[in-house]
Image (tube, rainbow, N blue to C red):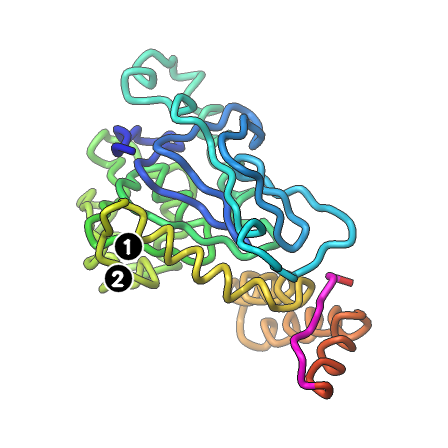
C-alpha cells in the first residue's frame, strides 16, 4: 500500500497502524465522522474480550487472555477510501465549521487514550499532524526508520488541536516539544527514537510493515497477563503521572485493591504453585 497524502488536523496517516491489546490496524488512511464505528475490511480481532471496530473497543462478557491460535491476533482496519479531510476540504470549511470539526477529532483521540486496554501505534510511513496526535494518545509507539512524523500545524498558522500540545511535552519534555512544534520539524524513525517519541525503531522490510510486526510482537507479550491487572495498571500509570508522588501512590494503592478480590489473582497464585501457565478470564 502506498503512503496516503497527509491531511493536517484530520485523522489521517500513511501506513500508521494502531494495535490495542492485540491489534487494530489502520490502513493507508482513516476518517472519523462522529463516531468510532466504521466498515470492516479485514478479520475482526478479539483479545481480552475487546472487539476493536475502527478504533473503538466494545466489551464482551467472560473474556479471556488466552490466545490459543494466531487467529486470535487478527486485525481490523478501515478501508482506504475512508480518509480524513485533506487541506482542500479544510479550505472549504467556514470558521464556524472548523471549531466543531477539531473538537470532534479531539474527542475521538481522547476516547482512544482512555481505552482500558494497552494500545500501540505502529508507524510504517507518514504520521503528521492529526496522525501523530493519535499516535501520541497510544500507550506505546513503534516506527520504521524510514517513517516520518511530526506536528507540523504551525506551517499553516494553526496549532495542534487534537491534544498534541499537551501529549507531546508529556512524552518528550516541554523544551524539546516546543522546539518541534515551533519549527514544524518532521522526524524520521531514528530521530524519533533519539528524542524518546517512540519506544522502538526498526529497519523497514520488503512488505513495508516492520513497525506493525513489532507491534504484534509486543501485543503477544501483553496477552498472557491478567486482564483486570492490565486495565488498572494503565489507569494507575495514567492518573499517577498527572499528580504528585504521594497522591500517585494513593492511586496505585486504590488500583491494587481492585485486583485483590478477583478470581484471576487466585488463578495466578495457583498456576504459580502448580508450575503451569495461568488461564485468566478477567474476573
Residue shown at 55% from the left, 27% from the top: 38
Residue 235 x/y as whole percent: 61, 61
* Within-10-Å neighbours for mark 1: few <14, some 14–19, many 20+: many
Dot 2 surroundings within 10 Å: few (below 14), some, or many (20 or more)? some
Residue under label 1? 177
Give the residues drawn in magenta, as a range.
275-282
Q: Is residue 261 above or below residue 281?
A: below
Task: Tell me what residue is drawn at x 54 percent, y 75 percent.
Answer: 245
- Which SS class for mark 1? helix
Residue name at image x 28 percent, y 39 percent: 128
The answer to which of 11 and 159 lies nearer the viewer is 11
Judge by depth and name the residue closer to the eye, 248 or 139. Answer: 139
In the image, residue 24 sits, relative to residue 63, either above or below, namely above
Mark nearer the N terminus (1 vs 2)? 1
Q: How many marks overall?
A: 2
Looking at the image, residue 37 sits to the left or right of residue 261; the answer is left
Q: Nearer the viewer, mark 1 or mark 2?
A: 2
277 in magenta: yes
The numbered mark at residue 193 is: 2
Where is the N terminus found, in terms of image quarters? top left
On the image, the x and y values in percent for residue 208 come to 27, 45
At horizontal 49% and vertical 24% (from top left) the residue drawn is: 100
Amino acid at each position: 500500500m502506498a503512503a496516503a497524502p497527509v491531511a493536517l488536523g484530520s485523522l489521517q496517516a500513511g501506513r500508521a497502524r494502531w494495535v490495542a491489546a492485540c491489534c487494530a490496524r489502520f490502513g493507508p488512511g482513516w476518517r472519523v465522522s462522529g463516531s468510532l464505528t466504521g466498515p470492516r475490511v479485514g478479520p475482526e480481532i478479539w483479545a481480552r474480550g475487546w472487539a476493536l471496530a475502527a478504533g473503538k473497543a466494545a466489551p464482551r462478557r467472560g473474556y479471556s487472555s488466552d490466545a490459543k491460535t494466531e487467529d486470535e491476533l487478527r486485525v481490523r482496519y478501515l478501508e482506504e477510501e475512508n480518509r480524513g479531510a485533506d487541506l482542500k476540504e479544510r479550505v472549504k470549511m467556514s470558521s464556524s465549521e472548523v471549531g466543531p470539526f477539531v473538537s470532534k477529532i479531539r474527542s475521538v483521540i481522547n476516547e482512544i487514550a482512555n481505552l482500558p486496554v494497552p494500545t500501540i501505534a505502529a508507524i510504517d510511513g507518514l504520521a503528521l499532524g492529526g496522525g501523530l496526535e493519535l499516535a501520541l494518545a497510544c500507550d506505546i509507539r513503534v516506527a520504521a526508520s524510514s517513517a516520518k512524523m511530526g506536528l507540523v500545524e504551525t506551517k499553516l498558522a494553526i496549532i495542534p488541536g487534537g491534544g498534541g500540545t499537551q501529549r507531546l511535552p508529556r512524552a518528550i519534555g516541554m523544551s524539546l516539544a516546543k522546539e518541534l512544534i515551533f519549527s514544524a520539524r518532521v522526524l524520521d524513525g531514528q530521530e524519533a527514537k533519539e528524542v524518546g517519541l517512540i519506544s522502538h525503531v526498526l529497519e523497514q522490510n520488503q512488505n513495508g510493515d516492520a513497525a506493525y510486526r513489532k507491534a504484534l510482537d509486543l501485543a503477544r507479550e501483553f496477552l498472557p497477563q491478567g486482564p483486570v491487572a492490565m486495565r488498572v495498571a494503565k489507569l494507575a500509570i495514567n492518573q499517577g503521572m498527572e499528580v504528585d508522588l504521594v497522591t500517585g501512590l494513593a492511586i496505585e494503592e486504590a488500583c491494587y485493591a481492585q485486583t485483590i478480590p478477583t478470581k484471576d489473582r487466585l488463578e495466578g497464585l495457583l498456576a504459580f504453585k502448580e508450575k503451569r501457565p495461568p488461564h485468566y478470564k478477567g474476573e
